[in-house]
Image (cartoon, helix red, strand yellow):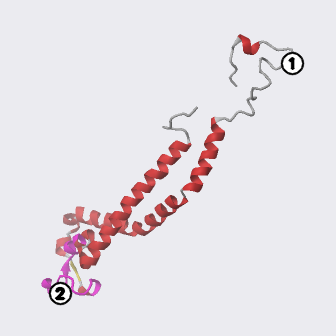
Amino acid sequence: MWLPLDANYLQEDRDGSLGKKPTQPSFAAAESPETEAVRTASTNGRRRPWVRRLHAILGLISSFNLLVLISTGFLLQHSTLLRLDERMLTRMILPDGYRPQDGGRGVRADIVVADLHSGRLFGVVGALALDIITLAWLVMLATGLVMYLSSQRTNGKGATTRR
């Protein structure tokens, strides 16, 4: 505990108040920065629950797409090593009307992986779905920044002190 070493403060009055005037608030009554931070944290938590909820929902929805992008990106990166250009995928597992110019036998695996990675596998709907998921990631980035910055302000980091 820090005590100021001021001679006026240390000089004891007749009433034993150690230099405090009767109208001065005591240290216990004064609001500490920790108390203010706790109050601000609880207020911020109540003010922005929708940001955390939106962040979580978008994260769960877009996580499947992220898994597809990661796995197809890995396959594209190592397509030569995995010899994807020599492998064929049968039409039974592909959407109807996908690349009819390749014939009835099937489609090369590297082409299917590239089209799945870019969203072209499902035509215009697939590309539109990827655009929507990309916008969802941007919203997640924004909500993540809002949550981070509000927690920094709540903890007193980066905030200007008010007096």
Q: Residue furthest front?
A: 23
Please say if 44 is above or below 85.
above
Q: Is residue 8 magenta?
A: no
Please say if 15 is above or below 142.
above
Residue shown at 30% from the left, 69% from the top = 130
Other residues around mark 2 within 10 Å, as few (<14) / some (14–19) / many (≥20): few
Disc 2/disc 1 C-alpha distance (Å): 101 Å
Image check: 131 left or right of 79?
right
Please say if 14 is above or below 66.
above
Residue 15: which disc? 1
Residue shown at 46% from the left, 51% from the top = 146
Q: Quadrant of residue 128?
A: bottom left
Q: Give the residue type at disc 2.
A: Arg
Q: Position of residue 108 (x, y in %)?
A: 18, 77
Q: Give the residue type at disc 1.
A: Asp
Residue 105: which disc? 2
Magenta residues span 92-114
Identify which residue, 134 or 93, lies in the foreground: 134
Q: Quadrant of residue 59?
A: bottom left
Please say if 42 is above or below 86.
above
Say which element carries label 2: loop
